[in-house]
Image: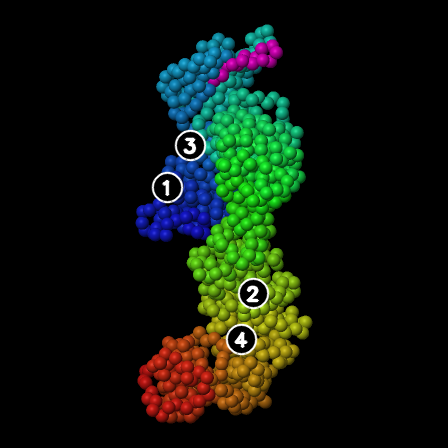
Amino acid sequence: MSDSGVAVKRGAQLSDNSPDSLLHTCVRYVVREGLDLRPVSLPQEICDLLIHVYRETHVNDSELVSESLQKFLSQFRANNSRVCVAKFADLSIIDETLESFLEEHSKSITHLDVSNCPHLTGQALTHINTALTRIVDTRRLRRTVRVIEEGPCHECRVLYTKHYANGVITTTRDNCTVDENVGLITDDYSLTQAMGIFDDPDFSDFKARKIRELNGIRGYDWRLSDEAMAVECDGVPAVATNRSPISVSECEYYKPSESFSKNMGDNRIKTLEIKTWQPSPLQTLIIGRSAHILPDYIEEDGLDDEEFSSHSHLINPLLTIRKLVIHEWNSIDTSAPYLKYLINSQMKHTLQHLDLSNGSAIDDGSPLEQLQSLKTLILYNCPKLHLAINNIVKITTLRCLDISSTNDRYGHGYKHPNKQLTLIVNSLPELTRLDISGTNLAGPRCEYIPGLVSRNATPFEYLGLYNTANEAAYRRTIPAHSVSGDATEEQILTACEAYIDRVEFLRRTLNDLFHCFRFETNFHNVNRALDIVLLSMSRHLHEKQIQIAASASLFYIVKSDEAKHNFNIKVKRLIITKLLDAMYEHRYDTTMLRNGSLTLIHFKIPTDVIFEYSRLVEILLHIVTNDEDDFIQRLVITLTVPVLYVLCIGIYLLNTLACQVDGDQKTIVGDLGAIDKMLSLIDTRLQRNMCDEVMETAWSTMWNVTDETPVNCERFLNQNGMDYFVSCMTSFPNSAELLRNMMGLLGNVAECEKLRPRLMNAQYIERFVELLDSESDGIEVSYNAAGILSHIASDGEYKWRQILPFDCSRDDMLNRMSAAISRWKINSKRNINYRSFEPILRLLKSSIPSEAQYWAVWALANLTRVYSQKYCPLLKDDRGLEVLEQLVDNESVPHRIKHLSSLTLYQYDLFTKESHLTALENSEDMEIPADFVRQSHR
């Protein structure tokens, strides 16, 4: 499914049993049509993909409400449709929805992404910390007990630690560890007893508390005696302690953490700490650009580095997270060492990937030393990193280090760049990927990078040198297999791929890519560039500069030879969709609209764009009526040879779209307000007394959208279109293109019987008759005027007399029309397009005036001669051959009509025999060979 970003095998069918087919079905019915999937059991992989597709479908949907998302997510139940990968980035998820989802899938979620979720609050972090480790299955619970003694000088020592898991209690005392198999224990009291806590006389009061809880009292005021009234957690008074005990199954009440302290005298305090949790499979936590769920300020007092201090760290130490991503966390006290709060005891052993891009300064970075398993450290755009280098290099497990920057104040702060880069490289032996883009670490200008000399024999897999000081990317010796920079096409493409999620870097690299296309004659990897451009447009729809830069490159990609020969319909549709997304999102930016329009005209219109017809028309109508002075009318661009000057890209595209589609699409154009907007353009130009290409194309567009579409013809009349016709004819009587387009449009109106009375106005008839003698644009204006009058005449003399004044002579009109037709050359080239001969054939009925028949049969003879390949087959398909034979055989038909009918039949038969009429196309000869034997077509 290319539209959702999920790859599916082409051969998968909805009727087969393959996972791909199941995914297709689910996407169609669950994501797009909202079918409830709760009665269905689905594989975990399908559930993950459905959430992914839903996100891709709605990521830019500003109208998606939280209730719709909550309804969709609530369908996934742990018992039949469990989820492992929960990607909620950019969605309108709220705290309550996140909490319920995490609780439902706490046993299965391994990946959670809540980046850029604006509706989440600080409660979301609480839900992440608690919901995933909350006990929902007592068979999987874990408990750790620690007893600590604090001396008079506040020194602490751990007396012993006990840990319960899977029926085994492990006791650690004085560095000695003992295991005891006690079997699975499912209730709180029995587990506390089995771990020996009740055996310690110092904790007798704690034992009493547990007995009360066992008897059904969840909490009470410790100031009261045992005989006093207890108090429930919700504040409602409970019965006294002698109430009947509840069953064990009802009192399995596990608190995440408990503590009990007792003053032992001599300023010594003995503390019992208990942690009870259920292991979570969560390995990846991406907070990303939702840093607003983190605290704005951290109290440094009371920080405890020990693992039991759950309030000391932002992330629950009971979560075994391997990948943590937090971006743009800046709203904190800059003097607080926030890494100290972020890195907990569990992360020291499990964290392998840490990304703190665009965050606050990490001071000297000393807490990072504790991360014993860290392989990837990303500190992109973090300030004052030069202060932390000495501690970063102590993380000897690092394989990927990113200290790049787009801010010169951050990136150029290394006072001894050669020494500091050498220190990084020599101290991190496992480093395979290093990004120093935007920094001065490459040192002063020379042929090589001094700090990387030691890696000449062992090149990096990837090295980021984009926008480094002193043009490091241009140096001769660069020890890396892949380099991001701006020196070559390959470096620029690599940079685009590396920084696809970094808006500032990506904007710059896309501009470099555009210059590659614009100024280099041979661009080698068009397909790779296309993938980058489309992905950039997809991921950063709301970033205007990204869309402009990407669409500028897309223009050159689409017009390339690679596109012309190798882009299939699937690729073309993806390009068009992304372009329209960008044009609609930034529809008030003329540069974006220009880029998109210039790119679209390189597609086959309307074939390639028909799947997005309505949306494209809507955007184009917006273009032609928005900022027209600065953009549409005054834009002159040379596209190719032969030279095509585009004064109105949007209206040109709109006109092309309307020209080659059927009635349904033409109706859509009218429904979207095309007639009104074209007349508005015309009105503006009439007020300025200006007839330009926009004026002409506006009439041409209306000509096309009214073709065999009566509803649009009526719209034209209802919006005072005839007044604009008269005004234009009066103001610009010598504009051949304008006259031809106006008369073509009115010819479409005249074909509609119910609308013709609205053309029967003495002023209009006078104009039509006047144009019969026009030689403007060949015969086109005269031809269209005669066509209009022929259709009006076909309604009969009675209607003429009924509507028109007495001094408007019908006979005079018919005579002048007949005289005009007789002057036309039969081989006249035409600028007209008929999709059907039906309106013409209707004029060949016996009741129609012969002058109107004369026009109709002349049209058939002309079109089948000059454009035989198109119109000879159309004549047959519309059953015109039978109509012509009837005219030839009818003795009452005038000779000139019979002759033109015979000529047309002769041309058709000759075309059928020879498949062309080359000899006749340029001939004015209207004689029919004497030996011609007409074939019967009845």
Q: Which residue is mark 1?
A: 42
**Residue count near mark 4 (Cα–Cα under 10 Å), binned few <14, some 14–19, many ≥20:** many
Q: Which residues are magenta?
A: 145-158
Q: Is residue 73 above or below residue 522?
A: above
Between discs 2 and 4, the one toward the N terminus? 2
**Residue count near mark 3 (Cα–Cα under 10 Å), binned few <14, some 14–19, many ≥20:** many
Q: Is residue 679 above or below residue 305?
A: below
The quarter holding residue 628 reads bottom right
**Nearer to us in this view, 20 or 493:** 493
Q: Which residue is mark 3?
A: 107
**Amino acid type, label 2:** Leu
Residue 646 visible here? yes
Q: Which mark is residue 639?
A: 2
Q: Please report the residue visible at 47 percent of the width from the left and 17 percent of the height from the top.
A: 145
Between discs 4 and 3, the one toward the N terminus? 3
**Amino acid type, label 3:** Lys
Between discs 1 and 4, the one toward the N terminus? 1
Q: Which residue is mark 4?
A: 745
| Label 2 – label 3 distance at C-alpha | 59 Å
Secondary structure under the numbered disc 1 in the rendered image: loop
